[in-house]
Image (cartoon, helix red, strand yellow):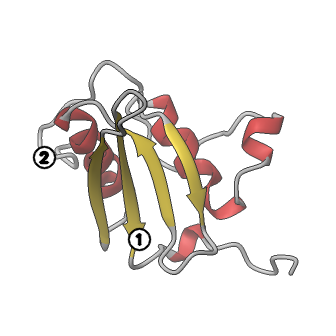
């Protein structure tokens, strides 16, 4: 991939580029069509996504995060696949009655045209 990911190698996972072939199963069928390939790509590279929505404004994906390397992996995967206007935030919540939660969110301020689904049923 000739330096497209700034020399950062993936953390032992498949460094795929979109489009990818998404498994035909109930898990992926339940994901918004615009997000399906991207969710597969992230999960196939070790990112545990938990929620996504292409109907939000801006579209977003939530994920579990345990170290800064995972955030860098997300950034590099997005960059390598034509996403250029997004924001990644991470949060650590420590409720008094349970274990700490580590999660993040990618908000897309511009969604690449090649991932937009035309004639979506309303």
Q: Is residue 29 visible?
A: yes
Mark in front: 1 vs 2 = 1
The residue lying at 47 percent from left, 34 percent from top is 48
Q: Tell me if residue 42 comes above or below residue 54 in the rendering.
A: above
The answer to the question of whether label 1 and label 2 lie on touching residues, with beta carbons closer than 8 A, is: no
Disc number for residue 6: 2
Left or right of 35? Residue 96 is left
In the rendered view of the protein, which quadrant contains the N terminus? Answer: top left
**Toward which corner of the image does residue 110 lie, by quadrant?**
bottom left
Q: Residues within 10 Å of mark 2 (few under 14, many from 20)?
A: few
Seen from this angle, which residue lies furthest right? 121
Mark 1 / mark 2, whichever is N-terminal: 2
Q: Tell me if residue 31 comes above or below residue 44 in the rendering.
A: below
Q: CA distance from mark 1 to mark 2?
A: 21 Å
In the rendered view of the protein, which quadrant contains the C terminus? Answer: bottom right
Total number of numbered discs in the rendering: 2
Q: Residues within 10 Å of mark 1 (few under 14, many from 20)?
A: many
Q: Is residue 1 visible?
A: no
Disc number for residue 108: 1
- Where residue 100 appears, as percent x and y from the top left, is 33, 32
Left or right of 13? Residue 38 is right
Which residue is at the front of the view, 117 or 61?
Answer: 61
Which residue is at the front of the view, 59 or 6?
Answer: 59
Tag 1's secondary structure?
strand
């Amino acid at each position: 991939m000739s330096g497209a990911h700034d020399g950062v190698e993936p953390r032992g996972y498949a460094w795929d580029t979109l489009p990818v072939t998404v498994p035909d199963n109930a898990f992926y069928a339940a994901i918004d069509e615009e997000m399906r390939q991207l969710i597969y790509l992230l999960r196939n590279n070790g990112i545990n996504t938990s929620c996504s929505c292409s109907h939000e404004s801006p579209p977003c994906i939530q994920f579990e995060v345990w170290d800064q390397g995972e955030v860098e992996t997300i950034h590099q995967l997005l960059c390598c696949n034509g996403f250029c206007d997004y924001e990644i935030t991470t949060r650590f919540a420590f409720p008094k009655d349970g274990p700490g939660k580590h999660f993040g969110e990618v908000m897309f301020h511009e969604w690449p045209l090649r991932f937009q689904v035309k004639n979506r049923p309303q």
